[in-house]
Structures are given as C-alpha cells and as structure tokens.
Amino acid sequence: MNKKNKKTTTKTAKYYTRLKYIGISFSAIMLAIFPLYLSDRYFNARHDKLNLFYFLAGVLVAATAVVYIFFDDRKKKDKIDKEFFLKTFSLVDWAIIAFAVSAIISTCTSPYCSSAVTGSMGRNNGLLLILVYTVTYFIMSRIYRQNIIVPVGVCISSALVSLLGIVNQFYW
C-alpha cells in the first residue's frame, strides 16, 4: 500500500470514527439522561420529554450533517458510500417507511389536519413526531456501533430512576 492510499484509508477511518461517536453519544444521552429529565414534579413530563427529544434529534441530524459535509475526505464525494446511507433496506427499514407513509396519509385525510401534524389533541404523537422518529431511526441504524458506555449508562440511569421512584413513594 502506497502512502497516498494509506492516507485516504486513515481519513476514511477518522470519518467513520466521528460518526460512531455521534451514534454512541446520542444513544447514551437518550438512554441515560432522557429518563431522568423531569420538571415540576412530573406535571410537565410529557412536554419536557417531547421537547428534549426534538432537541436531541435536531442535534443528531445537525452533527451527522456537519461530519458528512465537512469531514468526508473521500475522493468520490458525488457517490455516497453504499454501506452508509444507501445500503439495501431491511424488512424493518421498509416497515418504518410504510409507517411514515401511513402517518402522512392519515394526517392528510384527517378532519383535524393541523392538530394531526403536531398531535396537540392527543399525546403529541402527530406526524411531526413520527417523521422525527423515522429520520432518527435511519441515522442511528446507519451510524451506531456497539460500545460499553451505553449499557453502563442505562444501568446507572435505571438505578437512579428506581431510586427516585422509591424515594417518591415515601414522599421525600
């Protein structure tokens, strides 16, 4: 392997490493911090968690876009790596796409179209949230790689949530 190919391989490895860290960070925050994020003694839990999810999903999309646009040093920029975004879709990918399409059709045929977009008449599960779920799924299914940080964070967060539940039971 000559120096030029070695340098390109190193840049590609750094590119995928950056994407891997984005996926691990998002997973760790969603599974460790998200359950603990509450305000006003659970009164605003639904809205707090919805806004936190929108914020974190926006950061995920922005960080992935920044890495893809500014740090992708591969020579064929006009050709997206098939292994990254355009890999063959699995059954779950097609199910997510079908779910998003059915949500779009449902929203368009709803008599309460504006409320169906945001889900304001229910539990905020409108078209916007379903589309954010879809985008988040496709990004995370392409960039996440297993790491020990995520399960440890889940264990610690679960223990803290359980401790808060026990303490709240005794009105502390």
Image (cartoon, rainbow, N blue to C red):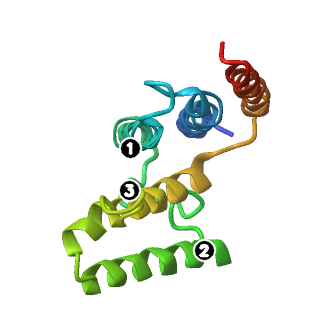
Q: CA distance from mark 2 to mark 1?
A: 28 Å
Judge the density around disc 3: few (<14), some (14-19), many (≥20) Cα neighbours within 10 Å: some
Outermost residue to the front: 171
| Residue 3 visible at all | no
Q: Are marks 3 and 1 in contact (CB under 8 Å)?
A: no
Q: Secondary structure at mark 2?
A: loop
In the image, residue 28 lies at what x, y percent?
63, 32
Pick whichever of labels 2 and 3 is earlier in the sequence. 2
Under circle 1, the secondary element is helix
- Mark 3 and mark 1 lie on one chain; the one further toward the N terminus is 1
Please state which of residues 91 and 120 is positioned toward the viewer in this rendering.
120
Q: Residue 14: horizontal and vertical position, in percent?
A: 57, 32
Residue, disc 3: 124
Q: Residue at x 45, y 43 (%)?
A: 46
Give the residue pinned by disc 2: 88
Residue 62 is left or right of residue 167, and the answer is: left
Q: Quadrant of the N terminus?
A: top right
Q: If the image is split into quadrants, where does the C terminus sit?
A: top right
Q: Residue at x 36, y 37 (%)?
A: 66
Q: Tell which circle, 2 or 1, labels the residue nearer the N-terminal end.
A: 1
Q: Position of residue 49 (x, y in %)?
A: 46, 39
Q: Residue 144: x percent and y percent? A: 64, 45
Of tags 3 and 1, the one toward the viewer is 3
Q: In the rendered structure, which amino acid carries the disc numbered 2?
A: Thr
Residue type, mark 1 in image:
Tyr
Image quadrant assignment for residue 104: bottom left
Marks counted in the figure total 3
Q: Amino acid at mark 3?
A: Asn
Question: What residue would you read off at disc 1?
Answer: 54
Tell me how far mark 3 sits from mark 1, CA to CA.
12 Å
